[in-house]
Structures are given as C-alpha cells and as structure tokens.
Image: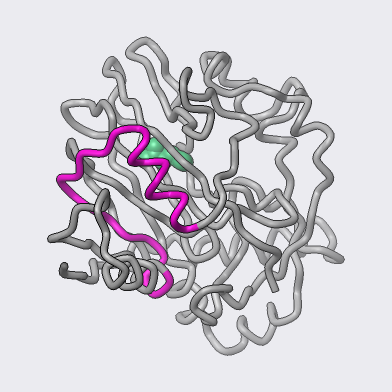
C-alpha cells in the first residue's frame, strides 16, 4: 500500500482493496486520514454492504436527516442530480454538519454513476488555511467562537437555499428537522480531535456569524477568512472515475461539488460517520 500526498490537499492511497484490510493497513489509512484531512482510493469495487462495513470501522454511522436515502440502505444518503435537474447538492464551499453540536467526523463518498465529463469535487485543507494565516490574524481569531445553523439551507423558510432552487425537491427534505435544530457555536480555530493540529473551523454555507460581533464586523472577518481559505494553493480538484472513493474529514477540510455537467446524471453514495464536540 502506498500513500502519496497530493498537490494542495489530501493524499491518494493505492495498492489496497478497502474491502479486505489488514490491521496494519487500517491503522495506516486512519493515520493518513488524520494527517491529510481527505484521502482518495481508486479502482475499488464496493457493494453497498462493503461501503457500510468500511465506514463502520471508523465509527457509528449518522443517518442523514435531509438527504434522500437509498431505498434499501438507510445508512446511505444519495447525492444525486438527474439529467433534467439544474441544481446539484453541495455546489459551493462547505463542510458538512457544522450546524450540529457534535459535528459528524466525515463522509465516505462512492461514485455510482458519473457524467462523461465534469462533476469533479474540490477539497480544501483547513489545516493549511490555518497554518498560512498571518500572525496578527491568528492572534485576532484565537478564542473566538462562531455560530452555525442549518435553517437557511435546509429549513422551511421560503428563501432557504434548497427551496429557492425548487428542482432539489425530492432529493432534499425534512425541513422541520432544520427548523427545530438550535443554532450552535464552535471555536473558530479547533484543535483537531485526531491529529491534535489546529484547523480553521468556519465555512461559507453554515457559519452565520462570529459570536459577540456586530453583523458588519462579523461579515468583514468571515469574508477575510474565506478569501484566504479558498485560495487554490490550499485545494485539490479530484476527478472521479468508476471505482473512486473519497473519505474526507469535516473538521479538517471543506469541499465543493462542481455543477458543470447539465443534461447528464450523477449519482454518488455517501455514508457519514458520527463525530464529537470540538474544542
Ligand atoms: C457533498 O457535498 O457531500 C457532495 C460531494 C460530491 O457530490 O462530490
């Protein structure tokens, strides 16, 4: 088994069949995941049961509240865009589940049907985003907390993101669960629970405010942090092929699914693993 660091973010792991991992291979994969924030595998052939078994080795599975589920496997959320649909799921920089008090650790995404061209996913390293901040900004954000919410994305308000894009109906639902979810705060800089490294933990989709700041000051700081975090140097563009698998850590990365394949179907199976409170 070989682990190769990728330009910008992440690592590719080759020479392994993730259905049959020895104890040593599993430990090396877990370490690579902690070190790189996102890892990629090629040429795998996972059934749904294999996908579930691989994810379960890393922790309990989170059953998604908002995504359409696989009809036989509730553990698998469908990330789907049909030929005639215009809006994709995850089509902007974000990290999943930051709206939860204990945000999910990460997800294992398996390509099931790909467009002939396009549909790549970008991943950005929030370790690198933090490490490359200037000293004054690191000092400014030390000790700050930010508010995260799901309401404006998944809730029932008329102008929420997915409602405003009506053709996501059927793929995204359960607005009531978002409406009753209390907004939460997390540190703007976390100490990553697996690696012990510092990572920037705000994201353009679910972070609504720096706690205790005016709207204006909060927006100015968040825009500055986002502009820095989304620099291409901190990111890797992953090109999917049949048999590709990506396993990302929500606490160490952002991701962005590109929506550049209108008229073609793209279907991914996503399993999300539970996480913990962040400090
Ligand atoms: C997601 O945001 O989970 C979707 C990623 C993708 O479809 O590439």
Image location of residue 102, percent across then percent down: 70, 57
Looking at the rendering, the stretch of residues picked out in magenta corresponds to 34-58
Q: Number of numbered discs present?
A: 0
Q: Residue 63 lies in what quarter of the image?
A: top right
On the image, the x and y values in percent for residue 244 come to 23, 44
Name above or below for residue 156 compared with residue 25: above
Residue beneath the point at 38% across and 53% down: 247
Q: Residue furthest top?
A: 84
| Residue 69 sits above or below residue 25 on the image | above
Left or right: where 277 falls relative to 5? right
| Residue at screen point 62% across, 29% down | 66
Whether residue 53 is in magenta: the answer is: yes
Check the image and report above or below for 242 versus 58: above
| Residue drawn at the location 28% of the way across and 73% of the way down | 24
Report the quarter where the C terminus lies: bottom right
Q: Is residue 154 left or right of residue 69?
A: right
User: Which coloring applies here?
Assistant: one colour
Viewer-nearest residue: 180 or 212: 180
Q: Position of residue 259 (x, y in %)?
A: 36, 32
Q: Is residue 83 left or right of residue 144?
A: left
Q: Residue at x 82, y 63 (%)?
A: 211
116 magenta-colored: no
> Quick one: quadrant of the N terminus?
bottom left
Q: Quadrant of ligand 1?
A: top left
Residue 107 vertical position relative to residue 45 in the rendered view, above or below: below
Question: Percent x, y for residue 271?
Answer: 46, 41
Horizontally, residue 58 falls left or right of residue 261, namely: right
């Amino acid at each position: 088994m070989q682990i190769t660091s990728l330009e910008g973010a992440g690592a590719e792991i080759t020479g392994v069949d993730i259905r049959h991992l020895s104890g040593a291979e599993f430990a090396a994969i877990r370490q690579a995941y902690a070190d790189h924030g996102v890892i990629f595998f090629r040429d795998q052939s996972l059934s749904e049961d294999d996908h579930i078994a691989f994810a379960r080795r890393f922790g309990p599975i989170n059953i998604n509240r908002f995504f359409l589920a696989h009809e036989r496997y509730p553990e698998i959320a469908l990330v789907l865009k049909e030929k005639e649909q215009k809006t994709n799921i995850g089509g902007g920089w974000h990290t999943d589940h930051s709206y939860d008090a204990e945000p999910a650790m990460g997800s294992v995404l398996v390509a099931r049907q790909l467009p002939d061209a396009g549909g790549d996913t970008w991943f950005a390293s929030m370790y690198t985003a933090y490490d490359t901040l200037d000293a004054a900004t690191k000092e400014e954000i030390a000790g700050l907390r930010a508010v995260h919410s799901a309401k404006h994305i998944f809730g029932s308000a008329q102008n929420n993101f997915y409602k405003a894009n009506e053709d996501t109906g059927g793929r995204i639902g359960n607005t009531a669960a978002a409406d009753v979810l209390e907004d939460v705060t997390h540190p703007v800089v976390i100490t990553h629970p697996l690696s012990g490294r510092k990572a920037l933990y705000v994201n353009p989709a679910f972070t609504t405010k720096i706690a205790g700041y005016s709207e204006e000051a909060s927006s100015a700081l968040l825009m500055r942090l986002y502009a820095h975090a989304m620099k291409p140097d901190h990111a890797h563009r992953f090109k999917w092929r049949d048999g590709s698998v990506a396993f990302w850590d929500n606490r160490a990365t952002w991701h962005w699914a590109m929506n550049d394949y209108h008229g073609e179907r793209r279907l991914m199976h996503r399993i999300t693993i539970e996480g913990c409170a962040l400090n």
